[in-house]
């Protein structure tokens, strides 16, 4: 009887414990820019980029709508991968909705010209009012409950393989390092986000020359579960050796209707061993039907759209669930 009572008491106590919280990720449509919101199990938020300026603060509004759906009332850390208008331009619009506590970036602007200076100075006017963190490869961003490792920044990448990585990359054998990119794309802050067994990779617009440095001759990253396709699916990024080396289970492409979604990149992803699905924020009108995913995997199928997002919910064991907010199509991917 005592054993039965103890078992019942244990079951009751277990039932009263709060369920383990998951990692929530929103791939927000900013029409071919980037805005990816992560909400850690403890509630802290990390926003990667802010989309475009202008359009009556469209992108700031869309980020705020996703944040509201996620129960986020502030951005704890804003990571700006690089200082192009489709990544940093939405800061002003976002600040009309949500406070930003920490700004994270690669440091100094590298491009010149009036437009680049205006864009950077506007961003800097907001950054200078809060805590500013300049990251370099090997650093971590302190999000409670997550391991956010910086793999690239300011034109450099990590020097040594991550734990468990370091295997040779066969596709590098007949592949020559591409010419160096001297603009902001090559300065991109790239991060690996780990939650238990779940691994997500977001390299911003990092170019193929630095992808080479990360996986050739040996893969410094290892494989990942979720890959935010670099540079909106443009072919100056997403080189075949890089994509094959990281071998994602699922890819999410933040392309616009007429930006990104290159058919060659699409095919490289689809041909990658182990890739189960490729989700897109938009149907790529400059490609063909054969190089777009099925409509159920595309958040916005019309050129003029409502800015629907793709939501990913990841569990610590590596299982994750993806939902298309447009048609509510959803799919679960079990751990490897």
Image (cartoon, helix red, strand yellow):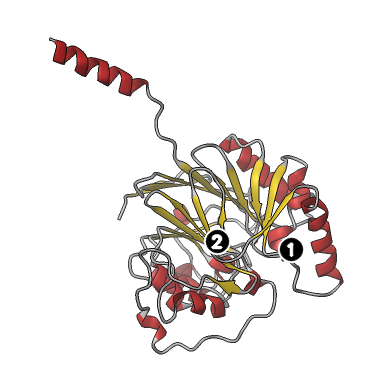
> Helix, strand or loop at disc 1?
helix
> Helix, strand or loop at disc 2?
loop
Q: Earlier in the sequence, mark 1 or mark 2?
A: 1
Q: Which residue is nearer to you in this view: 41 or 89? A: 41
Contact (CB < 8 A) between labels 1 and 2? no
Location of the C terminus (image quadrant): bottom left
Residue that badge 1 annotates: 85
Residue depicted at 31% across the width and 23% down the height: 14
Point out residue 300 in the picture as x, y percentages from the top left corner. Answer: 57, 53
Point out residue 223 in the picture as x, y percentages from the top left corner. Answer: 38, 64
70 sits left or right of 333 in the view: right
163 sits left or right of 289 in the view: left
As drawn, the label of residue 201 is none
Residue depicted at 36% across the width and 50% down the height: 318
CA–CA distance in space, label 1 to label 2: 22 Å
Q: Quadrant of residue 85?
A: bottom right
Residue furthest out toward the left: 1
Relative height, residue 25 to residue 208 (above, below)? above
Relative height, residue 10 to residue 230 (above, below)? above
Neighbour tally class for label 1: few under 14, some 14-19, many 20 plus, Cα within 10 Å: some
Residue depicted at 57% across the width and 37% down the height: 70
Point out residue 137 in the picture as x, y percentages from the top left corner. Answer: 56, 66
Residue that badge 2 annotates: 283
């Amino acid at each position: 009887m005592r054993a039965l009572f103890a078992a019942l008491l244990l079951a009751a106590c277990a039932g009263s414990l709060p369920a383990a919280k998951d990692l929530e990720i929103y791939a927000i449509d900013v029409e071919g820019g980037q805005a990816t919101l992560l909400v850690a199990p403890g509630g802290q938020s990390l926003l990667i980029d802010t989309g475009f300026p202008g359009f009556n603060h469209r992108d700031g509004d869309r980020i705020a709508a996703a944040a509201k759906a996620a129960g986020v009332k502030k951005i704890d850390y804003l990571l700006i991968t690089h200082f192009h208008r489709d990544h940093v331009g939405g800061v002003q619009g976002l600040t009309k909705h949500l406070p930003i506590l920490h700004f994270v970036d690669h440091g100094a602007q590298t491009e010149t010209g009036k437009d680049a200076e205006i864009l950077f100075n506007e961003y800097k006017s907001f950054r200078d009012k809060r805590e500013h963190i300049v990251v370099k490869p090997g650093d971590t961003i302190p999000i409670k409950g997550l391991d956010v490792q910086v793999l690239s920044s300011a034109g450099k990448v990590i020097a040594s393989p991550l734990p468990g990585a370091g295997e040779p990359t066969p596709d590098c054998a007949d592949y020559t390092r591409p010419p160096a990119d001297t603009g902001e794309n090559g300065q991109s802050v790239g991060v690996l986000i780990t939650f238990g067994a779940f691994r997500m990779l977001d390299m911003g617009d990092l170019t193929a020359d630095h992808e080479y440095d990360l996986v050739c001759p040996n893969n410094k990253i290892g494989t990942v579960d979720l890959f935010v396709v670099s540079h909106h699916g443009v072919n100056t990024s997403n080189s075949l050796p890089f994509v094959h080396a990281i071998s994602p289970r699922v890819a999410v492409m933040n392309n616009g209707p007429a930006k990104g979604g290159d058919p060659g990149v699409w095919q490289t992803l689809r041909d990658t061993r182990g890739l189960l699905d490729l989700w897109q924020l938009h149907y790529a009108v400059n490609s063909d039907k054969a190089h777009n995913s099925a409509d159920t995997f595309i958040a916005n199928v019309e050129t003029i759209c409502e800015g629907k997002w793709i939501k990913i919910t990841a569990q610590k064991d590596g299982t994750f669930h993806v939902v298309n907010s447009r048609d509510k199509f959803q799919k679960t991917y079990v751990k490897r």
